[in-house]
Image: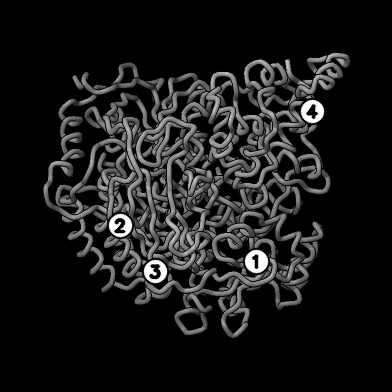
Amino acid sequence: MSEHFETHDHDVIVIGAGGAGLRAAIEASAAGVSVGLVCKSLLGKAHTVMAEGGVAAALSHVDPQDNWQTHFMDTMKGGSFLNHWRMAQLHAQEAPDRVRELEQWGALFDRTPDGRILQRAFGGHTWKRLAHVGDRTGLEMIRTLQDRGVHSGLDVYMECTVTRLLKDGDRIAGALAYWRESGRFVVFRAKAVVIATGGIGKSYRVTSNSWEYTGDGQALAYDAGAELIDMEFVQFHPTGMVWPPGVMGLLVTEGVRGEGGILRNSKGERFMWKYLPDARRHEYAENDAEAREWVEDAVAGRQGKSRRPPELSTRDNVARAIYTEVKEGRGSPHGGAFLDISYLPADRVKRKLPSMYHQFMELADVDITKTPMEVGPTTHYMMGGLRVDPDTAAATVPGLFAAGEAAAGMHGANRLGGNSLSDLLVFGRRAGAGASAYAKKQSAAPRVNDAEVEAETRALLAPFDRTAGESPYEVHRALQDVMDRLVGIFRVAGDLEAAIEQLRELEARAADVRVEGTRMFNPGWHLARDLKNMIVVSEAIARSALLRKESRGAHSRLDFPAPDPALGQVNHCVTRGASGMQVAATPLPQMPPELKAMFEAAKPAAKQEVAR
Amino acid sequence: MSGESGGREAVVRVFRGDASGGQEVEYRVPIEPGMVVLDAIHWIQSHRAPDLAVRWNCKAAKCGSCSAEVNGRPSLMCKTRMDHFAAGEAVSVRPMKTFPLIRDLVTDVSWNFEVNKRIAPFKPREGAEWKWQQSDIDRVQEFRKCIECFLCQDVCHVLRAHELKHRFAGPRFFVRVAALEMHPIDGEDRTKFLKETAGLGLCNITKCCTEVCPEGIHITDNAIIPLKERVVDRHYDFLRLIWNKLRGKPSDAI
């Protein structure tokens, strides 16, 4: 037995302490099982803290016409109908309760004039739907969940990185991790494991993501035999900072556009007019005057008749538009587009977008109440991840569960802004419930395989023994360069094939890196392990993208610019095969007729709106 | 912005070492426009010292991970611009002094998490209506901007110089208690905790915490002083208050 390692026993281990992980841990703990929450950073620092704009839920406080059905349809349309219909349905139905629950746990959202939770507009949402706290909604959520969590009787293991899921035969038996501080190993024995590790942004150079986003959950699950789906769908957020170099990629919240921000090119043209897809043009304002009226109504807190500005198109569309404007020579001085909110009263901008105001003032010397920002696309969010059962969040390995960004299906080919915060609440809760219910049903604790633990620890320590070899930082830079150049917003077969080839070389280089120093809080050593995860998910992205010979949602192929109805009926499923990574098309779960009928019924209403 | 830098280098002296000792090590770092101290640390990590220990996450002043003492001032490294220092001026980067050193720029801040756990959580009043005006929560929202960088804890002399961690919760947690106490429908009373466990009386309002807060929270004026008044209202009679005032003691001194 691996007695010489520090060992902890729990019914459920949750990996990751962002919104999804915390919500899962709170739920599992409430169900009466023993819960361990393991996270790479300090508690409360996870990526959720960076979410700015809001949490989408059809509370109908500002626009009374809103309901779960419309939210569901918006989500499916935004995801180009590649979403798992059941996840989109559960999400739309349960999000309002999850937001109210946060309020009951102490969160303080901005208010409507009649004292209820205020909601703002966001891209792709028919109605004003995002509950928010200025532009720091994620911080409010994580702090609320964190404070709830620490009084829930769960054990938190901070700055502890999981490197392997352990199995007993087919089922999950726990996880192996190391303490970042000491570098010592720790074995978690558990009946169920919830993956809530977030995204993959660090495979790219220009990203809004932090160092933690190295695809750990996806890669660990892949190694353990789980299915990953939709890995070709990487969301490039349209508005990241482009200047100065140190902050390139840093997120500029969609809230700026939700509050009325206008995108222009170097010729001063409001270019989003020409990029609106014909099928949805009727949902947007006819001209500048109508868009302005919409903003004025929003500022005054009244519901008017005007339709929303073109900047509130879906993220995939706005990102491609900015990219195209820059590519065709109409970019801003530093290779982006201008985003202008300075025409609104300065005090309103500072009140509704305080952290944007400070971010630009302090990091770029730009006063956004006086001058436009420069923005461009940045790698932001992974729609793909573990295939899960919508109701229980169970992955395809017994005992393994997933929620939040690491899980797939909810957002299909493109995520709407605001749907990630609601996603992590709805499915975090469901994963906690699913994992605890599963754990309760297991009569005997699974057995940890000593040989598996020994082999993993040996592999982890190997880079210390090498006297030659590259620095992991060098290999990381090379990986980011490959992904930025060859697997970015616009893709083409030749590039993707080249990327797969180069990823194979990078895999070999990563296996040979040398680490200097000791095991005590050594970021170089940590990166050496994280690199392997990043390479696995990068390969999954490139291979899935190569197979999807169409353009849909966030996945744009220059050699296949149109959607292919046949490919709209399949997910691409990545598994670990005997001879390496396998990608296969699997049929998309079919929406039941009563939900399908909603889309048919909605069509005439859309026409009426145009006529109005 | 100081404009394009064209091949300029900065001298950055980073503390390297652990609990057994250490010293500042000098690195020369190429300067890019708009560069912040954390960029310089990352450059050193990826080109000179791959094992340089540092905490960071968002690099956007939203998570409060990269706290350090830059030229002696408690700062977020991601928010401290290199061009704020004079050309040729060496920039010293050291770990927060108030917390036990782990390695290089990383300190053991776990004590803060222990203190947080002792604060009674939000408890809504029975039958309260979940409706309130924006103006009712502006103040609490100011407190909830806190990103837990612990720079206020680092600079506070009660913790830093007098090392009274066992008797004093520190500014961060007075802000947290203030947010709970001023929540429109919270029904818990934390004044006994403030007085007896959190040592609120030890704060003599020097406002150092407010000065270093990267979120600009008015810690002393908006959180600590109103809490002191609340404790006084609950725990001291009028005559005693006068007596303390006459003797020039803080109003809630024991």
Residue in front for this viewpoint, B191 or A497: B191
Separation of marks 1 and 2 at Cα, in angstroms = 37 Å
Separation of marks 3 and 4 at Cα, in angstroms = 61 Å
Q: Is residue A467 found left or right of A321 in the rendered image?
A: left
**Do discs 3 and 4 belong to a common subunit?**
yes
Query: What crowding class fits label 3: few (fewer than 14 Cα within 10 Å), some (14-19), or many (20 or more)?
Result: few
Separation of marks 4 and 2 at Cα, in angstroms = 51 Å
Quarter of the picture containing the N terminus of chain B is bottom right
**x, y (%) of residue A471?**
22, 53
Separation of marks 2 and 3 at Cα, in angstroms = 36 Å
**Do discs 4 and 2 belong to a common subunit?**
no
- Reading the image, the residue beneath label 1 is A367
Quarter of the picture containing the C terminus of chain B is top right
**x, y (%) of residue A442?**
35, 20
Residue B128 tag number: 4
Q: Residue at x 55, y 48 (%)?
A: B62
- Reading the image, the residue beneath label 3 is B8
- Reading the image, the residue beneath label 2 is A538
Q: Residue at x 74, y 19 (%)?
A: B253
The amino acid at mark 1 is: Asp
The amino acid at mark 2 is: Ser
